[in-house]
Image (spheres, rainbow, N blue to C red):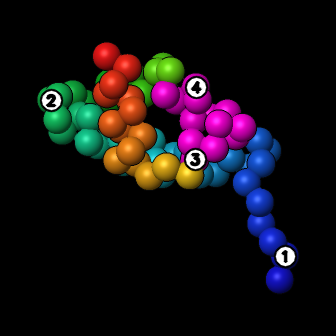
């Protein structure tokens, strides 16, 4: 069995699941559409850090990432 590693080349596979769960939480909490929530998340500093494999934020679950996103203000 081959060991699978997360790299900058395959990180994109993990992000949609985390971001979609964050968007549902954000849309529900603030009365936004999913599209509005996704746009705000994708434009955030949290997402820029998340998409950088070196930060290792991909280890975090959607709730922790969502809290980090909210702290941006």
| In the depicted structure, whether residue 2 falls above or below residue 34 | below
What residue is shown with label 4? 48
Which sits earlier in the primary sequence, circle 4 or circle 2? 2
Between tags 4 and 2, which lies in front?
4
What residue is shown with label 1? 2
61 relative position to 7: left or right: left
Q: Can residue 54 be found in the magenta stretch?
A: yes
Dominant SS type (magenta): helix
What residue is shown with label 3? 58
Magenta span: 46-58
> Disc 1 and disc 4: Cα gap in Å?
30 Å
Any part of residue 35 in sight = no
Q: Residue at x 38, y 29 (%)?
A: 69
Which sits earlier in the primary sequence, circle 3 or circle 2? 2
What residue is shown with label 2? 31
> Disc 4 and disc 2: Cα gap in Å?
24 Å
Q: Quadrant of residue 36?
A: top left
């Amino acid at each position: 069995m081959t060991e699978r590693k997360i790299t900058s080349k395959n990180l994109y596979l993990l992000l949609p699941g985390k971001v979609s769960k964050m968007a549902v939480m954000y849309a529900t909490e603030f009365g936004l559409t999913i599209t509005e929530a996704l746009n705000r998340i994708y434009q955030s500093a949290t997402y820029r850090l998340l998409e950088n494999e070196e930060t290792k934020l991909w280890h975090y679950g959607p709730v922790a990432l969502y809290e980090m996103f909210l702290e941006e203000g």
